[in-house]
Image (cartoon, grey):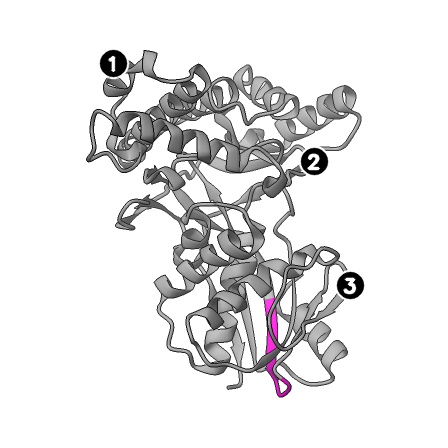
């Protein structure tokens, strides 16, 4: 999928040329998993896998949506926009339109075709790319005057309030604010951020897709968030100024261990240690200490597996294979969990051989093929073509 293909699809479906064509990238997260909704630090990047949108005005106020990869059509009613059980993909678009209407923004209907090469369910945040891209398109066509942060927040609200997944802001932020060959150190408490160059001329970022498709809304994701909130509530009895786990050190948490339900303590300890690992990873990147970065990635995976309990046998198998391969500097599961992919730092000359070996072993053990993707950090959402 690319801009030309999605433009052609738009013309075929809507018998008109699009007013605008937009690219919205997926994202990776180098380290800092499940810390964003706890006010913590994350280290994401937009990537060179994306969803492309072709769109034009519509005069009747409706939203006519075409999912090119699925060859599925959906047309909304005028008001109100309601959750769709049959066309689940449409909810990621309708959600941001609904939130924009709540804000009193004035806009008409839309013809919109979209498709891309962000693997669904792999933990690359195809949902955030859909949401951010949709509101970016709406803003461009109707001149809503939204800032980048407005787009990010509307995209997050669409997923929180309409789709029902209580995600943090990281995914949308990375999709909108990405910069080529850089990761973003994002403080999810106050949204301060800085770009950190990612210079790895001898190594590649390789994603191995387990093929296990997580459905986060129906999974334990929201449960993990509630468990973290329970932990904060426990500490607030003693420290009223604590507002999130970002305000908690490992030593403070350990001092009150007997006040927690055991499962809640495990969740909270993982989070506060993971926030510290993001700072350590940034130091490693600035000092070009890739072995240290790799060690931190393995620590993150172990925490996600044993303490946060969001890994699965397929992800653990892939990380275990990476640990014993000298060409792999670091590996961990990435994303919300319960499936998706691992992110790996692999020496360039070993990418092909390691991928082939792991794929063969994975098929032998799990009976299905393992997809792989070499990715690079890219720019965030951008206009590819525009006639308005």
Q: Magenta region's main secondary structure?
A: strand
Instruction: Assess disc 1: are there few (<14), some (14-19) or many (≥20) residues with their C-alpha within 10 Å of its C-alpha.
Output: few
Residue denoted by label 3:
71
Tell me which label, 3 or 2, sits earlier in the chain: 3
Left or right position of 63 against 47: right
Residue occupying image coordinates x 60% and y 75%: 79
Q: Is residue 269 above or below residue 45?
A: above
Instruction: Assess disc 3: are there few (<14), some (14-19) or many (≥20) residues with their C-alpha within 10 Å of its C-alpha.
Output: few
Left or right position of 150 against 157: left
Residues at badges 3 and 2 in contact (C-beta under 8 Å)?
no
Residue occupying image coordinates x 64% and y 38%: 214
Give the camera-side residue of 105 and 383.
105
Is residue 15 in view from this perspective?
Answer: yes
Residue 255: which disc? 1
Residue denoted by label 2:
211
Left or right position of 212 against 33: right
Picture quarter containing residue 233? top left
- Residue extent of the magenta highlight: 53-60
Left or right position of 235 against 200: left
Q: CA distance from mark 3 to mark 1?
A: 56 Å
Q: How many marks?
A: 3
Where residue 91 appears, as percent x and y from the top left, is 62, 59
Tell me which label, 3 or 1, sits earlier in the chain: 3
Q: Is residue 62 above or below residue 240?
A: below
Looking at the rendered image, the disc whose residue lies closer to the viewer, 3 or 1, is 1
Q: CA distance from mark 3 to mark 2?
A: 22 Å
Where residue 146 appears, as percent x and y from the top left, is 38, 72
Q: CA distance from mark 1 to mark 2?
A: 41 Å
Is residue 383 in view from this perspective?
Answer: no
Residue 50: which disc? none
């Amino acid at each position: 999928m690319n801009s030309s293909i999605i433009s052609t699809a738009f013309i075929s479906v809507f018998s008109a040329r699009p007013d605008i064509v937009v690219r919205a990238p997926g994202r990776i997260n180098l380290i800092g998993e499940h810390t964003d909704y706890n006010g913590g630090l994350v280290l994401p990047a937009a990537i060179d896998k994306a969803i492309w949108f072709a769109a034009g005005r519509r005069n009747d106020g409706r939203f006519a949506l075409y999912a090119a990869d699925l060859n599925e059509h959906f047309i909304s009613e005028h008001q109100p926009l309601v959750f769709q059980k049959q066309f689940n993909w449409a909810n990621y678009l309708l959600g941001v339109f609904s939130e924009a209407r709540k804000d009193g923004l004035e806009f008409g209907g839309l013809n919109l075709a979209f498709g891309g090469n962000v693997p669904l369910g792999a933990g690359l945040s195809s949902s955030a790319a859909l949401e951010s891209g949709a509101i970016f398109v709406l803003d461009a066509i109707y001149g809503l005057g939204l800032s980048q942060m407005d787009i990010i927040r509307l995209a997050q609200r669409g997923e929180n309030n309409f789709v029902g997944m209580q995600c943090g802001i990281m995914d949308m932020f990375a999709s909108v604010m990405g910069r080529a060959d850089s990761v973003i150190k994002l403080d999810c408490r106050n949204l301060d951020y800085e770009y950190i160059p990612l210079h790895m001329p001898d190594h590649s970022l390789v994603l191995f897709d387990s093929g296990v498709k997580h459905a986060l809304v129906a999974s334990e994701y929201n449960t993990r968030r509630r468990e973290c909130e329970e932990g904060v509530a426990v500490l607030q009895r003693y420290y009223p100024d604590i507002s999130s786990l970002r305000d908690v050190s490992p030593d403070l948490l350990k001092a009150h261990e007997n006040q927690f339900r055991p499962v809640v303590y495990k969740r909270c300890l993982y989070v506060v240690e993971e926030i510290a690992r993001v700072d350590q990873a940034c130091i490693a990147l600035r000092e070009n200490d890739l072995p240290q970065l790799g060690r931190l990635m393995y620590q993150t995976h172990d925490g996600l597996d044993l303490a946060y309990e969001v890994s699965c046998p397929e992800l653990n198998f892939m990380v275990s294979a990476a640990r014993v391969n000298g060409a792999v500097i670091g590996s961990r599961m990435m994303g919300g969990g319960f499936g998706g992919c691992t992110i790996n730092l692999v020496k360039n000359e070993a990418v092909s051989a390691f991928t082939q070996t792991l794929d063969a072993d994975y098929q032998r053990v799990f009976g299905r093929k393992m997809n792989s993707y070499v990715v690079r950090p890219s720019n965030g959402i951008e206009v590819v073509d525009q006639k308005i």
